[in-house]
Amino acid sequence: MKNYQLYKLFSSPVFHFTLENFKELNLELENFILSLRKNDEKGQKKSNAGGWHSKNFDINKENTAKKFATIIQRFVKKVVKDEMGWKYDSNKTIIEAMWSIINKKGSINIQHNHPNAFLSASYYVKFPKNSGNIKFFDPKEQKNIRHPKINKYTDISAAITEITPKEGDLLVFPSYLYHAVAENLSEYDRIIISFNVDIEYN
C-alpha cells in the first residue's frame, strides 16, 4: 500500500550502554556488594522474590558506591540532556537512590515500577547465562489486559519485551515503565545495581 505514514506516538525508550574496561570495576563492585550482604544478610523486601535486596547505598561517603555513581554521571547526562531533551543542571539532576540485588538460583523480581523518579537504571555486575532476562511491559495498561492474537511480534504489537544484558551493561529507562526479572535458572548469583534519577525544580 502506497502513500501512507506511520506515527509511533509516545514511545518508551530503553537506553542500552556498555561501560568500557568494566571488568576491574565489576570485581570491585562485587566485593563491595558481598560485604554489604555479609553485614546485612536479611536485606530488604521489595520486588525481590527469593533474592537479596540491599539498603540504599551511601553515595556521599568515599567508597566504591560513590566511585560508581561518579562514573555513570556522564550516561545520566547524555540521557537527560541529549536524548530526552530535558533541561540539565548537574546540581539538580541527582541520583536519589542506589541499591543492589543478588538473585540466587530460583529468584525473580516481580513486575513493578519506580514512582517519584524520572529515570531508573540497572547495571550488570554479574550476569551468568540463563540468570534472568529483564522484561519491560507496555505502559498502556489496556493493551496488557486485552489484545488480539499476535501473528508477528513487532515493536508495535508486543506487550512485553525482553532484553538479555551482558556484564558491564547499563540500561536506563523511564521510571514509569513496568519491568520484571525472569527466574534465575543458573547455579550462580546474578548481581545488579539499580538506581533512580530525580530532577529538582524550584
Image (cartoon, rainbow, N blue to C red):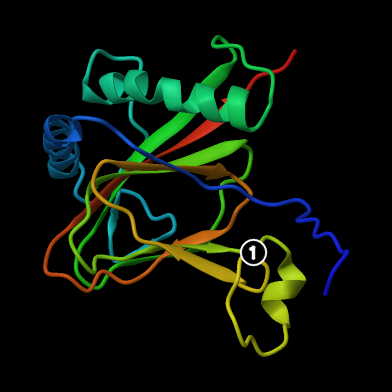
Q: Is residue 95 visible?
A: no
Position of residue 38 in the picture relative to residue 2 (left or right): left
Please give left or right for residue 34 compared with residue 196 in the image.
Answer: left
- Classify 61 as above or below 76: above
Please identify the residue farthest to the right as the structure is shown.
3
- Foreground of the two, 137 or 35: 137
Q: Is residue 76 visible?
A: yes
The amino acid pointed to by label 1 is: Asp
Residue 58 vs residue 92, the one in the foreground: 92
Q: Quadrant of residue 117?
A: top right
Q: Quadrant of the N terminus?
A: bottom right
Q: Position of residue 161 (x, y in %)?
A: 51, 66
Q: Quadrant of the C terminus?
A: top right
Q: Which residue is mark 1?
A: 138
143 displayed left or right of 89: right
Q: Residue at x 62, y 16 (%)?
A: 88
Image quadrant in which you'd find residue 68: top left
Percent x, y for residue 129?
Answer: 19, 65
User: Does residue 144 lie above or below 4 as drawn?
Assistant: below
144 in relation to 72, above or below: below
Q: Residue furthest front?
A: 2
In the image, what residue occupies the spot 49% across and 27% down? 76
Residue beneath the point at 21% across and 23% down: 64
> What is the x, y in percent for residue 126?
19, 49
Residue occupying image coordinates x 29% and y 14%: 61
Q: Position of residue 144 (x, y in %)?
A: 67, 75
30, 152: nearer the viewer = 152
